[in-house]
């Protein structure tokens, strides 16, 4: 399986988590996903009254220097980590 296919598979797997990840983890995933799919952020930063959109923009901007492949690998790693945590919680 190629990197892109594995990335897409993990993008679907993240939706199977029974517990919503923390906001921090969600923002990390968001930034990595956007960087992997679309490259560097290409919009202006949302205003201060759009706090959610601004946080998402900041998360994407934070990974701006990563290549698409790096972002895909980091995304896959993060999803695996979240799945492992969920599995360990389920077994206790």
Image (spheres, rainbow, N blue to C red):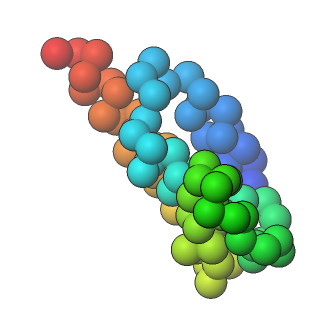
Total label count? 0
Q: Is residue 20 above or below residue 70?
A: above
Q: Is residue 92 above or below residue 83?
A: above
Q: In the picture, residue 8 is in which quadrant?
A: top right
Q: Which residue appears at 63% of the width and 73% of the height?
A: 61
Image coords of residue 65 (percent x, y): 62, 84
Residue 35 visible, this orientation: no
Q: Quadrant of the C terminus?
A: top left
Please name whichever residue, 18 or 62, is drawn nearer the observer in this view of the structure. Answer: 62
Residue farthest to the left?
Answer: 92
Please name whichever residue, 59 or 80, is drawn nearer the observer in this view of the structure. Answer: 59
Image coords of residue 43 (percent x, y): 82, 71
Residue farthest to the bottom?
Answer: 65
Q: In the picture, residue 56 is in which quadrant?
A: bottom right
Q: Is residue 47 above or below residue 90?
A: below
Left or right? Give the position of 2 relative to 48: right
Q: Which residue appears at 78% of the width and 74% of the height?
A: 44
Left or right? Give the position of 70 relative to 68: left
Image coords of residue 82 (percent x, y): 40, 39
Q: Which residue appears at 59% of the width and 53% of the height?
A: 51
Q: In the picture, residue 54 is in which quadrant?
A: bottom right
Residue 49 visible, this orientation: yes
Please name whichever residue, 12 or 2, is drawn nearer the observer in this view of the structure. Answer: 12
Q: Is residue 6 above or below residue 35?
A: above
Q: Which residue appears at 57% of the width and 64% of the height?
A: 59
């Amino acid at each position: 399986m190629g990197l892109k296919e594995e990335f897409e598979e993990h993008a679907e797997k993240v939706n199977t988590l029974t517990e919503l990840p923390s906001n921090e983890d969600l923002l990390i995933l968001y930034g990595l996903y956007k960087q992997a799919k679309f490259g560097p952020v290409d919009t202006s930063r949302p205003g201060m009254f759009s706090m959610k959109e601004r946080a998402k923009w900041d998360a994407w901007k934070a990974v701006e220097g990563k290549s698409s492949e790096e972002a895909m690998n980091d995304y896959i790693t993060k999803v695996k980590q979240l799945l492992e945590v969920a599995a360990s919680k389920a077994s206790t």
